[in-house]
Amino acid sequence: MIITSFRADGFRNLKNINISLHPRLNILCGKNAQGKTNILEAVWLCSGEKSFRGAREKELCGVDRDMYSIGLDFKDRRRGQSIEISSSGGEIKNRRVSLNGVTLKNPAALFGELQCVVFTPEDLGLSKGPPDNRRRFADLSISQLKGSYRAVTEKYRRLNEQRSFQLKAAALGKSDPALLDVWDIQLSQMGAYITMLRYNYCKKLSYVSSFLYREISGGAEELTIKYDSTVFESLEGRNDYKGDLAAEYLE
């Protein structure tokens, strides 16, 4: 995948930027606060993800600007494509996204089209930080490989919130505890599916990363990555997430 051109106006401190990129290697050089990271952030937004700096929509507009636009052209294995994003008023609901001239419902529809990897100092928390950091990393990576996965994790999150609300209501005598079965069954199927995909991704990641790490260390060290589930003892060769895996998850 090769980005051939990038453009931006009104995005943070970027004004009337139009860059043609080299197909193999590009290095951004400049003084502090000139906008190098802003360009990377804008490219990252074109993958359908939120800002890797945790910025809110209104923070993306430049000073004294009420709108911004970014776009890029890229080539993948199949064809050349173009992404355009614009936003006004500092509201995420006002963000407009198009792929090859076709308007998309939301930025998430870009998942899997422009596949990006970003590495920042905060990513050291993958190994040093809590497990939640690693789960988010796995979910982000899987979403870029399987566009529909993000919708599943988002639905799982909403169901879990609704189930928590029912638990509190039942504890106060305001809801029938039997209603929890409805949420439990749905969460079990989705939880089994998410766990299965995380396991398969980590298995592939371990294979690739162990090979690369042997090269880095000159064969002196080994790196292995293992996914430990708190639900399943073993996931090897298992894919029936609507049947046996869901039943085990429910139990």
Image (cartoon, helix red, strand yellow):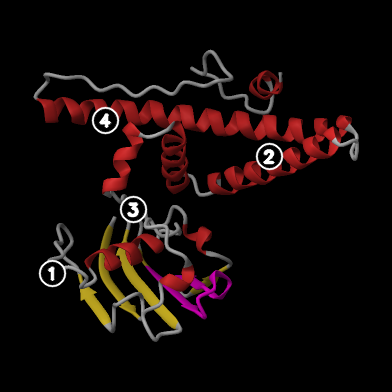
Q: Which residue is mark 2?
A: 160
Please report whichever mark, 2 or 4, sits nearer to the chain's N-terminal start: 2
Few, some or many C-alpha atoms within 10 Å of disc 3 (few <14, some 14-19, many ≥20)?
some
Kindly check if marks 2 and 4 are in contact, taking CB atoms under 8 A apart as contact: no
Q: Position of residue 22 (x, y in %)?
A: 16, 65
Element at badge 1?
A: loop
Looking at the picture, which amino acid does disc 3 mark? Cys
Seen at 35% across and 36% down, the residue is 126
- Depth-wise, is mark 1 or mark 3 nearer the camera? 1
Q: Residue furthest top?
A: 233
Element at badge 4?
A: helix
Looking at the picture, which amino acid does disc 1 mark? Gly
Image quadrant where residue 138 sits: top left
Count all numbered tags in the image, as a single digit. Answer: 4
**Residue 97 inside the magenta-drawn segment:** yes
Please report whichever mark, 3 or 2, sits nearer to the chain's N-terminal start: 3
Please report whichever mark, 4 or 1, sits nearer to the chain's N-terminal start: 1
169 with respect to 158 (left or right): right
Q: Quadrant of the C terminus?
A: top right
Q: Which residue is mark 3?
A: 116
Q: From mark 2 to mark 1, how far is it between C-alphas? A: 46 Å
Q: Which mark is residue 209?
A: 4
Seen at 44% across and 57% down, the residue is 49
Q: From mark 1 to mark 3, how far is it between C-alphas? A: 23 Å
Q: From mark 3 to mark 2, how far is it between C-alphas? A: 29 Å
Q: Which residue is mark 1?
A: 30
Please report whichever mark, 3 or 4, sits nearer to the chain's N-terminal start: 3
Element at badge 3?
A: loop
